[in-house]
Image: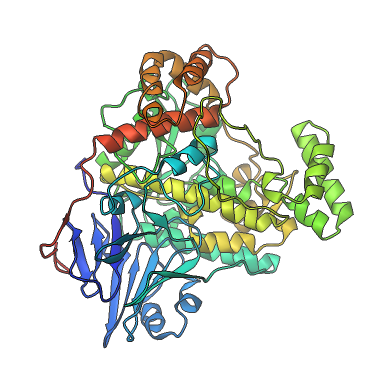
């Protein structure tokens, strides 16, 4: 499979002085510049012009040409564009010469800004933008990532001088002054029926605009990926890929995959062997990404899977990532019930959750009364004993609002998953995660509490919304397999390689003490009970720094870029 550059896009503020543009970029507009880099499906880069006003939709989007033209003339861009399914960024140049960039609500298409002597620059890749401001890692952001990757440093990215645009905000750039930000998205309540209809439309259309007319593959494992696979099969042939241990050819995910017999679906097992164990070296070097990718520890498996699908002709792969975050609810809603004085429901739900977890309900009730929805039912591992750097202020949600706790968590996971898309791009395959789409998040948080939160049913909102699509055996499935044993085994087999990561770049930056980290690696390799999240974060960050060090980075030039429409 031919390597290709990561897909990203960006632009400049109006009135900017003549400035550098990324080498290899395709210019969509000039004055102010708007560009795309990498190999995009034509349907995912659309522009409309009317006089001096222009609009571009970048990424998979359900909007028709009429919808886009209407948004071009609309007084409020967000009002028209908020219902468009998919994961995309909308850019509008008004007749008054103002640039408006609509950041999606789910953070699946993250945006960043940098300030340069030639004016502000915005883009969808913090790594690419970092080369304009020195290409230095933000050690404060990295310290927060090592402490808890789900609580990122507030207002910072992995790169010094590169600032994130908040998800669900409108970035506005004028001829004078710096960028301004206006919140355009907030949850709106719907009835149970309305929420399900919105979810069905958002997820169904989000899948359609990705797979229609192209050769596509999907993950085929749990309820989330199965739903995406069945939706994709409605729009053309699709191959569902099910990973499984090579020695096991029945049961588990395979049993559920083999039970699906729908037109347009081809089932493809992906047997996993020793060379796919976590921490195993890959023949494919780990590419540089905006931040450490979640799949870093299993890159050998992920790279082989992507390569296999690409060799089979797939240009588009859909995952079920994000489904657990949306539908596998925590008891966070207990705080909302307590705030609203719904004591009977709160005590009953706390008792159900405690029974499910085989614990006393008292800690859940106490947490609900304290009113911090984000922390209810979530493990706090504390600061890793090897982390030595101070951690800056982090972005976390406090208070009893379970919906905003869900939004905060999903946005963090979606932004991190963008690094997975960049990994796939490096191997020539477009990776998509429809559950991270902003309209899908909007639909889920609009649903009433009782429609989403249940200790007695598995993912009730997803199962009910797609009840006519999912077979009974899939709708009643209550769990999926764990891979903790594989991590212990993979660490044991690759202990020397992993220990080589311990005393490296993180230690040189003064972020960690390698001695306790080395001891934890030895203990985990021997099978000791291990708190995996902080350990995996440290190892992923070290591997990421190594990949960045060996990456040439984005180059910029003052020469004329490729004109719009050129190949």
Which residue is found at the position 35% from the left and 57% from the top? 124
Query: Furthest residue to the left?
Result: 559
**Residue 330 image point, x, y percent:** 68, 45
Looking at the image, residue 257 sits to the left or right of residue 132; the answer is right
- Nearest the viewer among 70 and 218 is 70
Quarter of the image that includes the C terminus: bottom left
Looking at the image, residue 247 sits to the left or right of residue 300; the answer is right
Quarter of the image that includes the N terminus: top left
Residue 127 in view in this figure? yes
Query: Furthest residue to the bottom?
Result: 51
**Residue 152 image point, x, y percent:** 51, 46
The figure's colour scheme reads rainbow
Which residue is found at the position 70% from the left and 40% from the top? 377
Which residue is found at the position 40% from the left and 30% from the top? 506
Looking at the image, residue 13 sits to the left or right of residue 567; the answer is right
- Nearest the viewer among 262 and 24 is 24
In this picture, is 394 found above or below 210? above
**Residue 168 image point, x, y percent:** 50, 65
Residue 97, quarter of picture: bottom left
């Amino acid at each position: 499979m031919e390597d290709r550059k990561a897909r990203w896009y960006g632009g400049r503020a109006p009135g900017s002085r003549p400035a550098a543009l990324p080498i290899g970029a395709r210019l969509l507009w000039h004055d102010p510049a708007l560009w795309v880099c990498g190999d995009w499906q034509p349907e995912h880069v659309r522009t409309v012009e009317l006089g001096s006003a222009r609009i571009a939709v970048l990424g998979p989007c359900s909007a028709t040409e009429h919808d886009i033209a209407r948004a071009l003339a609309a007084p409020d861009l967000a009002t028209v564009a908020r219902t468009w399914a998919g994961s995309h960024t909308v850019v509008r140049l008004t007749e008054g010469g103002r640039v408006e960039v609509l950041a999606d609500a789910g953070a699946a298409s993250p945006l960043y800004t940098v300030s340069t002597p030639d004016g502000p620059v915005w883009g969808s890749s913090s790594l690419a933008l970092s080369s304009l401001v020195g290409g230095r890692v933000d050690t404060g952001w990295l310290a927060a990532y090592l402490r808890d990757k789900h609580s990122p440093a507030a207002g910072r990215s992995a790169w010094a001088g590169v600032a994130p645009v908040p998800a669900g905000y409108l970035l506005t750039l004028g001829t004078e002054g710096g960028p301004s930000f206006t919140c355009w998205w907030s949850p709106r309540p719907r009835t149970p029926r309305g929420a399900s209809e919105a979810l069905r439309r958002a997820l169904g259309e989000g899948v359609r605009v990705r797979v229609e007319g192209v050769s596509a593959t999907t993950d085929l494992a749990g309820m989330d990926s199965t739903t995406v696979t069945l939706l994709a099969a409605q729009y053309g042939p699709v191959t569902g890929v099910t990973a499984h241990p090579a020695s096991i050819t029945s049961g588990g995910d395979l049993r559920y995959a083999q039970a699906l017999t729908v037109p347009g679906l081809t089932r493809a097992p992906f047997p996993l062997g020793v060379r796919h164990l976590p921490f195993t070296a890959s023949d494919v070097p780990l590419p540089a990404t905006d931040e450490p990718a979640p799949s870093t520890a299993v890159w050998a498996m992920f790279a082989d899977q992507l390569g296999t699908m690409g060799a089979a002709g797939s240009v588009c792969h859909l995952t079920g990532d994000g489904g657990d975050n949306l539908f596998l609810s925590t008891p966070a809603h207990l705080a909302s019930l307590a705030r609203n004085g719904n004591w009977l429901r709160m005590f009953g739900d706390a008792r159900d959750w405690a029974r499910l977890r085989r614990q006393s309900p008292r800690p859940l009730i106490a947490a609900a009364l304290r009113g911090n929805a984000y922390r209810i039912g979530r493990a706090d591992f504390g600061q890793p004993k090897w982390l030595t750097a101070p951690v800056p202020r982090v972005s976390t949600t406090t208070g009893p609002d379970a919906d905003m706790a869900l939004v905060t968590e999903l946005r963090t996971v979606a932004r991190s998953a963008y690094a997975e898309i960049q990994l796939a791009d490096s191997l020539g395959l477009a990776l998509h995660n429809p559950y991270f789409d902003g309209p899908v998040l909007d639909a889920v948080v609009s649903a009433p509490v009782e429609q989403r939160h249940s200790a007695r049913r598995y993912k009730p909102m997803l199962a009910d919304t797609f009840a006519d699509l999912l077979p009974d055996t899939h709708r009643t499935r209550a769990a999926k397999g764990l891979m903790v044993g594989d991590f212990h085994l993979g660490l044991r087999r690759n202990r020397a390689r992993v220990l080589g990561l311990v005393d490296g770049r993180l230690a040189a930056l003064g972020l960690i003490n390698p001695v306790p980290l080395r001891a934890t690696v030895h203990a985990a390799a021997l099978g000791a009970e291990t708190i995996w999240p902080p350990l995996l974060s440290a190892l992923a960050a070290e591997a990421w720094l190594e990949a960045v060090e060996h990456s040439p980075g984005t180059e910029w030039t003052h020469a004329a870029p490729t004109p719009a429409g050129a190949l």
